């Protein structure tokens, strides 16, 4: 059959809508079927292998710094990957990059968005973030996905769930694995936030894992802590307990649309009563309770206006600056704790006796406190 000839099994309606042709195959038995560059001259018709690609140039710290400060989103993403690396060979370079851009950070509004699974965090952030971007703000979303304790993997599907926002030219979405870190945020969320600020993003949204009342670490990273609540799910009274509600600067009842409007309004009234009973140490501010519907884009402007009121109150009463300064100290303490844990686990004396001690503890032959004492003695030796 010649090149381009139609096969004999073409149906009766063999018009141009049916575009099946039989094409000649590759005669060379060593050819892998991939395109090749034809060599000119005597070797015409013989496919020559493609020349190997030139290895990518290794980026220096200044390359990252210049890219971030110029607002290059690709370079920002690569710098975040560098920061998140646990490899020792990347540590010094990552810290050099961070030190080179810190003078341009600290000028954004930092917002933490938390709530139980199913409350609609991603949907709310997409609606809220798109509104902010349309208002000519540059918005960075740091979305944290839980890391499996079994496989060690994370889905990292937030860009898919925030499809509209991810396409906006004023947005930058970075999903990161929690890496087993407690508090609902990733281990390097603070560093990532500083990089985004240096890249010119004036509003940083940190979406937490969504595991309930353990999500308090994000409170020590942001200016305004927004807690999303569901109406009719039992959260109204549970929220009274000394937990995450106590830390909230703003409460938002989500999914206040359709048949759920009445329930959302009742939840709003109940939570407003709760807020009035709580001790609010923030001078000049008492948490507000608002309604929102991400599907109908209702309440989004009220949320943004209330956040503006909160920021203005913080500047007027001077506690916003003090809050960030205390957060810097808390960050240092967290890094010290992490360094001490790593130093303990990598100590040769501890590594030598840990398997034996762990086995004795597992079999119930050694009390945990005595095991700890033996490990600490090996660490100090």
Image: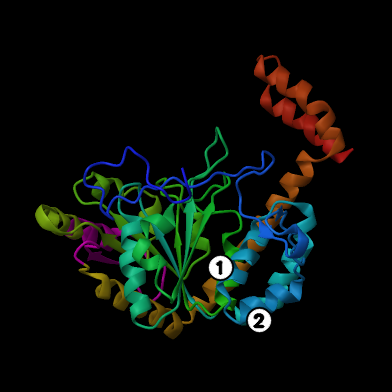
Mark sitting earlier along the chain (1/2): 2
**Residue 204: x and y, percent?**
47, 70
What colour-coding does the image apply?
A: rainbow
Q: Confirm whether the magenta stretch covers residue 295.
A: yes
Q: What residue would you read off at disc 1?
A: 193
Near-viewer residue (319 or 142)? 142
Q: Confirm whether the magenta stretch covers residue 102.
A: no
Which residue occupies the extreme bottom position in the image?
316
Vertical arrangement, residue 116 with respect to residue 347, above or below: below
Q: Which mark is residue 127?
A: none
Q: Is residue 345 left or right of residue 297?
A: right
Q: Is residue 280 left or right of residue 359?
A: left
Magenta-colored span: 269-296
Which residue occupies the extreme front position in the image?
2
Task: Give me the residue at 62% from left, 76% from top.
Answer: 68
Vertical arrangement, residue 19 with respect to residue 248, above or below: above
Graded by Cα atoms within 10 Å as few (under 14), some (14 to 19) or many (20 or more), the crowding at tag 1 reads many
**Residue 79: x and y, percent?**
65, 66
**Residue 121: x and y, percent?**
35, 56
Near-viewer residue (358 or 47)? 47
Q: Which mark is residue 103?
A: 2
Label 1 secondary element:
helix
């Amino acid at each position: 059959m010649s090149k381009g000839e139609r096969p004999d099994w073409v149906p009766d309606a063999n018009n141009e809508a049916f575009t099946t042709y039989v094409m000649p195959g590759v005669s060379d038995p060593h050819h892998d079927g991939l395109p090749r560059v034809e060599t000119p001259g005597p070797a015409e018709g013989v496919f020559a292998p493609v020349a190997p690609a030139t290895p990518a140039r290794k980026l220096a710290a200044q390359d990252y710094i210049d890219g971030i400060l110029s607002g290059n989103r690709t370079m920002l993403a690569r710098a975040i990957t560098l920061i998140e690396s646990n490899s020792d060979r990347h540590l010094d370079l990552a810290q050099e990059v961070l030190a080179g851009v810190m003078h341009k950070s600290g000028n954004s509004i930092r917002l933490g968005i938390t709530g139980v699974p199913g409350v609609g965090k991603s949907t709310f952030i997409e609606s809220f973030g798109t509104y902010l971007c349309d208002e000519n703000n540059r918005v960075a979303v740091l979305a944290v996905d839980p890391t499996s304790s079994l496989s060690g993997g994370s889905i990292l599907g937030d860009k898919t769930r925030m499809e509209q926002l991810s396409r906006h030219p004023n947005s930058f979405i970075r999903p990161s694995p929690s890496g087993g870190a407690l508090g609902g945020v990733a281990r390097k969320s603070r560093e990532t936030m500083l990089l985004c600020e240096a890249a010119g993003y004036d509003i940083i949204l940190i979406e937490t894992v969504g595991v309930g009342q353990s999500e308090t670490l994000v409170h020590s990273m942001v200016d305004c802590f927004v807690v999303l609540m569901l109406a009719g799910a039992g959260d109204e009274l549970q929220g009274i307990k000394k937990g995450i509600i106590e830390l909230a600067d703003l409460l938002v009842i989500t999914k206040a649309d359709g048949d759920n409007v009445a329930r959302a309004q009742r939840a709003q009234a109940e939570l407003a009563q709760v807020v009035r009973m709580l001790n609010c140490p923030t001078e000049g501010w008492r948490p507000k309770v608002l309604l929102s519907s991400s599907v109908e884009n209702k309440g989004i402007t009220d949320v943004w206006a209330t956040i503006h009121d909160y920021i203005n109150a913080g500047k007027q009463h001077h506690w916003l600056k003090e809050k960030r300064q205390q957060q810097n100290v808390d960050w240092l303490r967290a890094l010290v704790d992490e360094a001490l844990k790593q130093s303990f686990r990598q100590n040769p004396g501890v590594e030598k006796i840990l398997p034996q001690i762990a086995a004795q503890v597992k079999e119930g032959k050694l009390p945990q406190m005595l095991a700890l004492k033996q490990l600490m003695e090996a660490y100090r030796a």
